[in-house]
Amino acid sequence: MATIGFGRVAVIVPAYNEEMSIGNVLDELNSQNPGNWDVIVVNDKSQDNTLQVAMKHPNVVIDLPINLGIGGCVQSGLLYAYRHNYSFAIQFDSDGQHVANEIKTLLWGMNETKADVVIGSRFIRSFSGQFKSSFNRRIGINLISIATKLLTGKRIKDPTSGFRAFNNAAIKLFAENYPVHFPEPESIILLHKNNFKVHEVSTLMNPRNGGRSSIEKKAGFYMISVLLGMIISAMRPQVQYRSENEV
Amino acid sequence: MKFDPSVDIDRFQILAVIGSLIFLALIVYLVRKKKLREDYSLLWLFFGGIFLLLSIWRESLEYISKAIGVAYAPAAIFIILIMSLFMIMIQFSIIISKQANQISMLAQEISLLKLKNSSSEQESEVKK
């Protein structure tokens, strides 16, 4: 059943008010599933019919009783993956931006580099204008990228990308400690502080159809809190794991 | 220090002592009634005690203001008051943050339990 070289993969799909796109996203994931993926939807207390649409699919649906935001939402999925001993977890957005076929690229990247976390990047190589992003957005991402370089010494071109693969060590780390508000850039610092290896691979991405990124809505506020969050993450001590039975 | 003879300063001292005592009694009452937890009442009791001390032993305020270089002694009381409120508010922020984390953990546990529950219900229906 499983593809050669890979264990079981939890594909975590955090969803908040995505009734328009989540059906297609799940259909795509299910049709591309090589057999070792379990698609896990985490509904972050959506106000629309996201839950109902997700329930019509044969996938596992974790339904949060209150809205936790993207950090707590992804963490619920990782907690599930940790407790069910998945070898790998993929974070896959429900807005249709990520391409199911590229999950293999992330896992191959992980296999090749032995990294703990692999980030799918829109910027490493351009796919003949496949992914265009606005000028302001590029500036913001570059600033976060520079801050990442200063704080970790590692160049990550797309630190805000939510298309990621985690190995079981990273699943364990994040099941207990996952940044709350703007988790993507902060989690890179957290990984670096705890001596985890992060690698970035180039992946294809769909342009956003409908809905704006959480980054663009409150750009100034986002930049300040992200940079502050990153600096504070860099000042934190290493994670001490709780005892096994508490997790 | 010059006193305005028309103002009865002793009267205010009595009021301050009574006020501090009522405050301390209120805190103790709330803890006894379990409306306030012991661990969160410590800072309130501590500052209530300080204000009781300041109102009983009036010269202490003058010593304090001299020690920290405040020319007008009554101003020192505002510094002490503001510092105590700051400390208590920081304690509140710590408690709120801790509770936010706990709520988030509980929500995650509930969602996982809901999932477990619904899948075991489905299994038992299949067996029937």
Image (tube, coloured by chain):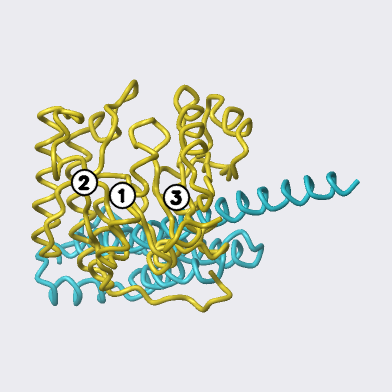
Count numbered badges in the picture.
3
- Confirm or deny contact between disc 1 and disc 2 (CB under 8 A): yes
Going from N to C along the chain, the mark reached first, 2 or 3, is: 3
* 10 Å crowding of disc 2: few (<14), some (14-19), many (20+): many
The kind of residue on which mark 1 rests is: Thr
Which numbered circle lies on residue A202? 2
In this view, the residue farthest toward the right is: B128
Q: Quadrant of residue A173?
A: bottom left
Looking at the rendered structure, whether the residues under marks 1 and 2 are on a common chain is answered as yes
CA separation, marks 3 and 1? 26 Å
Residue name at image x 52 percent, y 43 percent:
A42
CA separation, marks 2 and 3? 27 Å
Question: Percent from the top left, x then y, of residue B97?
Answer: 41, 57
Q: Which residue, given by chain and number where applicable, does mark 3 sit on?
A: A72
Going from N to C along the chain, the mark reached first, 1 or 2, is: 1
The kind of residue on which mark 3 rests is: Gly
Q: Is residue A50 above or below residue A4?
A: above
- Chain at tag 3: A
* 10 Å crowding of disc 3: few (<14), some (14-19), many (20+): many
In this view, the mark in front (3 or 1): 1
Compared across the picture, whether A108 is left or right of A156 comes to right
- Mark 3, secondary structure of its residue: helix
For chain A, the rendered hue is: yellow
